[in-house]
Image (cartoon, rainbow, N blue to C red):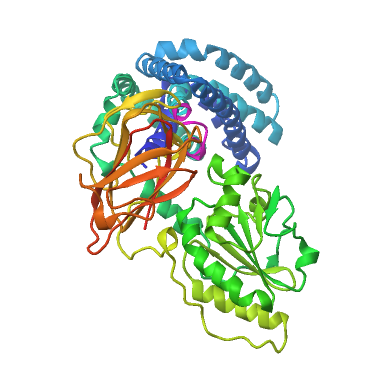
């Protein structure tokens, strides 16, 4: 969260530079007019200018980084240049001179108008004239965003910067000459602050280029706030899992690329039925743990008018392969209809965001209940009974609740502290502890540190880390994880389609009675298809352990760890 505060402060500081003084008189000239007709249009025009320039810079920077590893070097070079511009204002002035000329021209046109349109034009001019001050700090935010890709994180950084700039300008408009005079007295402090920030940026580039940042921060897991931030987001934006959904018409099921266990279904065919739509994907451990209940409900209520439809929306690329899904459906014993939603057409129609997600639809085609994630099985089954009785007056149903017990990966999770779901691809990677920095989409060698803190993991050997997975390039690679939980699962595949052997250990020993469904007591196993593998199930006392999986063959591809 500190980086967002710094971005906000950076936006505020843009108004404290000497080069902003020529701009402020034009803004203050309209301070005696209505804020709605004068001040607000200026702010909107300035914001629009920043938005357009920032969007172009972010997209261009992200494209540059995506080209290859050299794009990262180019982005770091840009950061170095901008850091030097902070230290030496004359560099900044020369870099931004074309923007100043354009802004001056726009300002002259705006000065001839006194309407809302004139205020908007003046805001655009302010945006360009402000460029020498905002340019270096805004550029640092943009370059940093380019290194991480154009995503919600970088958009939030830009929003924080814009909020800071708008705050300072708004204060200037409201306070008028008093703020203007105070700024004149404090310009020297801001100049030294800018130069100090520039020196820190230059030093930071040296640290990043040498890989010292990764090696140092890897020793401190408390610095990684991604998990806690995601939990907060879930609490703020995730609907109440036990609440009855606001009644709305269920979207159509059109858009599936294929149907399994059934011909294509539509609204007319489902009229008068109670429908449970289950969004799932076959390598998702949370989805697998709900399957025993779905299968039991299908067996108990199908004859009474319940239709369960599994909408398979893939998380990984290999889950788009129809043959993989067909094999998973057969192996998992799923008999109800499955819609293949490779283009996420049904997913988007429902505005869904979770695996698994259950939507209960009444006989009239309206969504009456929804639940996200595991759990709440009793409430869901009771709602199934209610909707069936509504649809079929006089229907006799047992009020009893199904009792199920899954096996292997479908067994319910233990009520213990568990490590978070951990992705090995660089797109969603966290808690990586190898001393070497990840080289995106490029083969590189990694090593395992002697110590791993809880929830940390590391690679050893030659791996190519892509967006979704880590691919072993040569025999002898391994993955270590200091995990918490009863069960350890790993989504694995073979890139060349050939069987790949592996061997797992716990705390340096064979797992013995702690082996999973896909390993034996000595820890041996074979990757034969792309799916989730249960490698460890602790028996007896459950405690945090150090896990290791070794691959004597090349071609193993690892996607994500999950725990139970």
Q: Would residue 293 appear left or right of 251 to someone viewing this image?
A: left
- Please state, as top left, top right, bottom left or bottom right, where the C terminus lies in the image: bottom left
Question: Looking at the picture, how far across and down is residue 202, in whole percent?
Answer: 32, 19
Q: Is residue 210 above or below residue 41?
A: above
Please identify the quarter of the rendering in which residue 298 is found: bottom right
Q: Is residue 397 above or below residue 212?
A: below
Question: Looking at the picture, how far across and down is residue 25, in whole percent?
Answer: 53, 26
| Residue 430 in view of the camera | no
> Residue shown at 46%/62% (left/top)?
289
> Residue shown at 70%/33% (left/top)?
117
Question: Looking at the picture, how far across and down is residue 300, in whole percent?
Answer: 59, 77
Mainly helix, strand or loop, the magenta region? helix
| Residue 337 in view of the camera | yes
> Residue shown at 46%/73% (left/top)?
404
Where does the magenta region start and end? 145-156
**Residue at the right extreme, as displayed:** 268
Q: Is residue 152 above or below residue 207?
A: below
Instruction: Please give the count of numbered marks on the rendered protein.
Output: 0
Front-most of 464 and 90?
Answer: 464
Front-most of 441 and 169?
Answer: 441
Taking the magenta stretch, the answer to whether it contains residue 422 is no
Q: Would residue 167 appear left or right of 228 to someone viewing this image?
A: right
- Please state, as top left, top right, bottom left or bottom right, where the N terminus lies in the image: top left
Q: Is residue 399 above or below residue 132?
A: below
Question: Looking at the picture, how far across and down is residue 219, in whole percent?
Answer: 23, 37
Front-most of 398 and 176?
Answer: 398
Front-most of 21 and 160?
Answer: 160
């Amino acid at each position: 969260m500190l980086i967002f505060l710094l971005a906000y402060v950076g936006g505020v500081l843009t108004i404290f530079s000497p080069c902003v003084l020529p701009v402020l008189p034009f803004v203050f000239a309209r301070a005696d007019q209505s804020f709605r007709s004068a001040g607000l249009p200026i702010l909107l025009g300035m914001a629009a200018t920043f938005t357009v320039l920032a969007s172009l810079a972010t997209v261009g920077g992200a494209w540059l980084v995506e080209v290859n590893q050299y794009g990262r070097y180019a982005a770091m070079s840009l950061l170095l240049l901008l850091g030097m511009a902070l230290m030496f204002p004359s560099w900044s002035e020369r870099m931004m001179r074309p923007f100043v000329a354009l802004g001056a021209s726009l300002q002259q046109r705006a000065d001839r108008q006194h309407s809302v349109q004139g205020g908007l034009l003046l805001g655009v001019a302010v945006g360009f004239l402000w460029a020498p001050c905002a340019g270096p700090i805004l550029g640092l935010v943009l370059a940093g965003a380019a290194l991480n890709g154009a995503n919600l994180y970088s958009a939030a950084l830009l929003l924080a910067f814009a909020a800071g700039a708008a705050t300072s300008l708004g204060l200037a408009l409201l306070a008028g000459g008093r703020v203007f005079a105070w700024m004149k007295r404090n310009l020297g402090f801001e100049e030294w602050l800018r130069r100090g920030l520039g020196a820190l940026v230059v030093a930071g580039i040296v640290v990043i280029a040498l890989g010292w940042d990764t090696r140092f921060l890897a020793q401190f897991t408390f610095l990684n706030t991604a998990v806690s931030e995601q939990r907060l987001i879930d609490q703020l934006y995730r609907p109440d899992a036990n609440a009855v959904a606001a009644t709305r018409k269920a979207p159509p099921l059109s858009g599936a690329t294929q149907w399994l266990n059934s011909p294509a279904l539509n609204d007319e065919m489902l009229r008068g039925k109670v429908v449970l739509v289950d969004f799932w994907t076959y390598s998702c451990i949370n989805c697998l743990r709900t399957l025993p209940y779905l299968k039991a409900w299908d067996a108990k209520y199908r004859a009474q008018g319940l239709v369960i439809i599994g909408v398979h929306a893939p998380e990984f690329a290999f889950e788009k392969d129809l043959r993989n899904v067909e094999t998973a459906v057969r192996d998992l014993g799923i008999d109800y209809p499955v819609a293949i939603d490779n283009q996420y057409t049904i997913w988007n129609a429902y505005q869904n965001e979770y695996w698994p997600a259950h939507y209960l639809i009444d006989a009239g085609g309206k969504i009456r209940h929804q639940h996200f994630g595991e759990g709440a099985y009793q409430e869901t089954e009771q709602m199934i009974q209610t909707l069936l009785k509504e649809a079929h007056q006089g229907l006799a149903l047992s009020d009893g609740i199904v009792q199920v017990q899954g096996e292997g990966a479908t067994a319910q999770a233990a009520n213990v502290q568990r490590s978070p779901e951990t992705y090995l691809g660089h797109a969603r990677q966290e808690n990586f502890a190898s001393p070497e920095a990840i080289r995106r989409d490029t083969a590189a060698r990694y090593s395992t540190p002697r110590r791993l803190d809880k929830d940390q993991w590391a690679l050893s050997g030659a791996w190519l880390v892509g967006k979704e997975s880590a691919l072993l390039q040569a025999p002898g690679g391994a993955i270590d994880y200091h995990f918490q939980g009863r069960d350890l699962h790993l989504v694995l595949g073979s890139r060349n389609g050939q069987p790949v052997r592996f061997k797992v250990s716990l705390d340096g020993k064979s797992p013995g009675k702690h082996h999973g469904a896909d390993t034996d007591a000595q820890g041996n196993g074979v990757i034969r298809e792309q799916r989730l593998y249960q490698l460890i199930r602790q028996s007896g006392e459950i405690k945090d352990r150090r896990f290791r999986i070794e691959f004597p063959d090349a071609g193993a591809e690892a996607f994500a760890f999950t725990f139970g």
